[in-house]
Image (tube, helix red, strand yellow):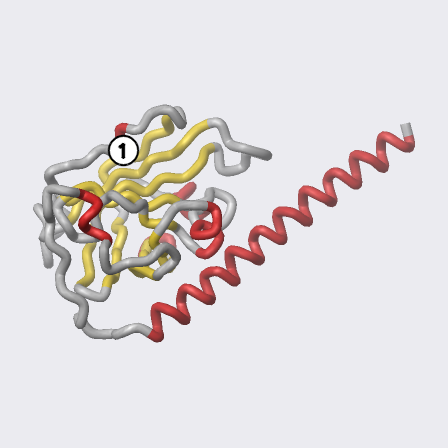
Amino acid sequence: MRLISWMLIAAGLSLAGYGAYQYYLSRQGQIVAKEEWSAGPQTAEEPVPSSPPVASRYFDPYKLGDPVAKLRLPRLDTTLYVVEGTDQKDLKKGPGHMPGTALPGVNGNCVIAGHRDTHFRPLQNIREGDEVVLDTRYGTFRYKVRSMEVISPTNVASLRPTQNAVLHLITCYPFNYVGHAPKRMVIEADLMKPGSDGSAAGGL
């Protein structure tokens, strides 16, 4: 029994250490992304992206790991730097904009994914009607949360192209699950008209 107790304690300490290490990596990744974002042009020097019919053409100017936008959740007092790409290396640095989906403010489906236990942990407290702000090199775009849904990993409806400017934030669920979480949480938000009180807009 004593051996089992020590083994359980060791396993708990290992899990806690791993979690702390992952949190440290996420913080360091955001520091790097913030520095890269700050080092770039702070005015609208980049051209406004177009909305061509072929989705993959949206992203020619961006390389994997490049900062694409600054994401703000005003009510949750959260600021995150979004990078291009959604593989494990990119997601350690920050929430990742999924290649092949629209850029912020562009007509189409903008998809951003992040880890539930690091960068996207604040999403456990998001509500319908919350504002999601995306600052880019070519402008600032505000979205209003329309819905939150917990889905199966095999449900890919949130990745499909759309006509209007829509934002999907995706993370694993439940937030406090130990190990590989079995579900996904999808937050859907609509682009707001400039200066509006939350009505949906079309996009660029």
Q: Residue at x 58, y 34 (%)?
A: 179
Q: Residue at x 33, y 35 (%)?
A: 186
Q: Position of residue 35 (x, y in %)?
A: 41, 71
Q: Position of residue 45 (x, y in %)?
A: 18, 72
Indicate the secondary structure of the residue bearing disc 1.
helix
Q: Position of residue 30 (x, y in %)?
A: 45, 61
Q: Is residue 129 left or right of residue 119?
A: left
The residue under label 1 is which amino acid type?
Ser
Q: Looking at the picture, tell me which residue is in the foreground, 166 or 148.
A: 166
**Quarter that holds the N terminus:** top right
User: Is residue 142 visible to us here?
Assistant: yes
User: Is residue 201 visible to us here?
Assistant: no
- Classify 169 as above or below 31: above
State which quadrant residue 167 falls in: top left
State which quadrant residue 98 falls in: top left
- Classify 38 as above or below 122: below
